[in-house]
Image (spheres, coloured by chain):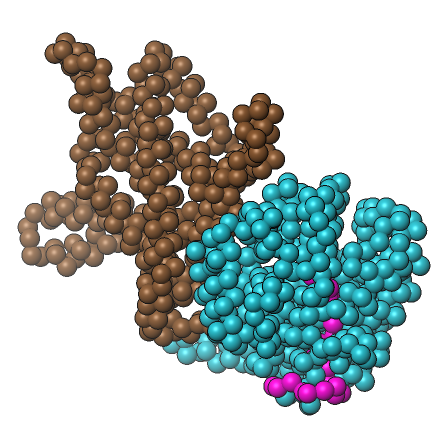
Chain colours: A brown, B cyan
Amino acid sequence: MAATITDEDTQIAGPAKPPITAYIGRIASRVASYLQAVPLALILGFFFLLPILMIAVVSFWDYDFAGLYPDFLTMNYTDTLGSWVTWKTYLNTLKYTAMVWGLTLLIGFWVAYFLAFHIRTTTMQMVLFLVCTVPFLTSNIIRMISWIPVLGRNGLVNTTLIEMGIIPSPIEWLLYSDFAVVLAMVHLNTLFMVTPIFNTLMRIDRSLIEAARDAGANGWQILWNVIIPLAKPGIAIGSIFVVTLVMADFSTVQVMSGGQSASVALMMKNQMSLLQYPAAAANAVVLLIVVLLMVAAILRVVDIRKEL
Amino acid sequence: MTNDTKTPKGISRRGLLKTGAAATGAIVGSGLITGFPTIWAQNPITLRQFGTGVSNINAIAEKCKADLGITLEMTATDSDAAAQRAVTQPDSYDIADIEYWILKKVFPAGVIQPMDIKKLKYYDKIVPLFKTGKLKPDSVIAQGTAPHTVGYVEAPGDKTFAKGETQFFTMVPTIYNADTLGIRPDLVGRDITSWADIMDPAFKGKTSILNIPSIGIMDAAMIMEALGNIKYADKGNMTKDEIDATIDFLIKAKQDGQFRAFWKSFDESVNLMASGEVVIQSMWSPAVAAVRSKGIACKYQPLKEGYRSWGGGLGLAAHLEGAQLDAAYEYINWYTSGWVGGYLNRQGYYSAAMDTAKEFMSADEWGYWIEGKPATGDIMSPEGKVMEKAGAVRDGGSFEERMGKVACWNSVMDEDRYMVKRWNEFIAA
């Protein structure tokens, strides 16, 4: 490919400029860089851009139980945005996102800090980091469902507390509640916070901490003024993972709330199971925009590339 | 240049193939190959069956192959996907295994051809529920999409259903059953007699209904009516006002904390019941059996307002003709001849032709499942697992007691889309 293109280019450009070799070289390098970008562009184009474009197109179509009809209707959007259910569902999903983000950030930073600064040898650090990933060797669904026998009315927690005489009757809000949803989500997503933060903490030059101490800073001041600012890119990357995962979650909300709470993705799934694809597509486009805005806000606060 | 010479060749080759296919079709269609059971083994016929009900049962396909030599290719889907496929891909199946309310949706699209009852060997044996809507002459016709209302057309090619019994039958019924509430008799602590009992404040936070809009709304309607909140003209086809009243009531109950959870799949309902999270809930009969098989008491409680019933059948695709059509009739006649009926009855469902099924069941099985008598020996599932010990009596009693008390059939409403929208509000509320 590269050869034929450059040949043609020389034939056309040949008579015009005397230093042909330099010219070929320049063209070749330009073509080469395009060629290098082709595989990624093709993959992203076919598997990412095209599907999203199709979703956007379908979101304007008409439908009934039997099929989809190409059209240009804004009905799917007006139905979605005009309903209090959508707003309530978005609010609920954002509530979960905020709570899960806060908790995973706190726990994730804590764990990463311990691994990075309190474990002396690199080997041990790696061993403990791998230990953190062990739960991820089982499936997401299994880790989530395992909470049910623990939290249930006759589950481990309730029976233990009752037998110890701490509570007279089972605590009802442990399962099928917002508490259960947030608990499961934090459990599922904390590692996505730990990994990038641990990574950035490991890159911090230890002499900076020594310098701060020499300059008279105490532990909290070092944490606040040195470590956290330098860990920002990791925090930002972890936040992007957690926010996008929670915003798009449907199975955790469905299972842990016992179908009593709604999330945006669950709303979409309901529509899809009723074959209302255009309505689901419109919802997907709205969700995509919301999530992109959130990611943009995160990147606005932290420049990942600059600080990596 | 090369293109010019090649093109005519391509066309002629394709033309040849076309003529060949047409000739084969003509031979098949002309009746040179006729419908005797013996012929299928020599000239194998495959029928593609898709749907929600019996298509989930592989044993039927195996027995069909052994008895008739017809290969059944079965695909199981959920009901919404089945409705869509029936209409949009009518050539992708030969037999549609769908519920009656789905038939009501898809039949007007002209994708199902009615059957001539003269070709149905066991038509006379099919229970009258599917012909007149009455199990016994004095039964009351239930609300909703009752099978007999979509059971007949005046003539082949008609898109509207006939008022009464005619020569053209749209579907041969396969399985049907009567659904009610499941309870944990050890935990409810009192007699449960009415659909309204699920709203008893004593069971606050210990009840569940199913989160499948088209069925959930019917259970809700049974509850509303039992509470005396409303009297529906037709529970199976509510007006917008009736839908609003029902959903508003559900939202209030949800916000008061009456429900523990909403279930969507079979296993969820089993787990809710078995773990004691819920003591009274909407349930399907195999789920009750599954809870009991764990050694936990669970009862499929008959209620005074009656049952919510469902039923499915086999319909012939419009494109079937010639030998394939004959094979399809052969299959349906085999289907109603008894073996399948016995199999389904032993699973706790009901079969369309009870008289033929009886011959394939032991006296004890017939007594337990159909007559509501105490079992004299252990009752086995078709797979050979013990389902009930000797002495057990089926919840709700006999076939006539259960199917004779149907209050409402699963249905599709005219305001379907509005109902689904409001149902989603209930879940989000």
B178 relative to A17 in the view: left or right = right
- Residue B274 shows in the view: yes
Q: Is residue B223 above or below residue A185?
A: below
Q: From the top left corner, tell me how far across and down residue A154 is, in percent.
A: 61, 35
In this orientation, which residue lies closer to the viewer: A136 or A52?
Answer: A136
A61 relative to A299 in the view: left or right = right
- Residue B89 shows in the view: no
Q: Residue at x 45, y 28 (%)?
A: A133
Q: Residue at x 6, y 53 (%)?
A: A17
Residue B294: image quadrant is top right
Q: Is residue A133 above or below residue B288?
A: above
Residue B400: image quadrant is bottom right
Q: From the top left corner, tell me how far across and down residue B380 is, in percent.
A: 84, 50
Magenta highlight on residue B164: yes
Q: Is residue B168 above or below residue A298?
A: below
- In this picture, which residue range is highlighted in magenta? B159-179
Seen from this angle, which residue lies furthest bottom? B155
Magenta highlight on residue B284: no
In this orientation, which residue lies closer to the viewer: A293 or B396?
Answer: B396
Q: Residue at x 41, y 79 (%)?
A: B4
Q: In what quadrant of the picture does the C terminus of chain A appear?
A: top left
B355 relative to B162 in the view: left or right = right
Q: Is residue B156 above or below residue B74?
A: below
Q: From the top left corner, tell me how far across and down residue A47 is, in percent.
A: 38, 53
Q: From the top left corner, tell me how far across and down residue A297 is, in percent.
A: 22, 44
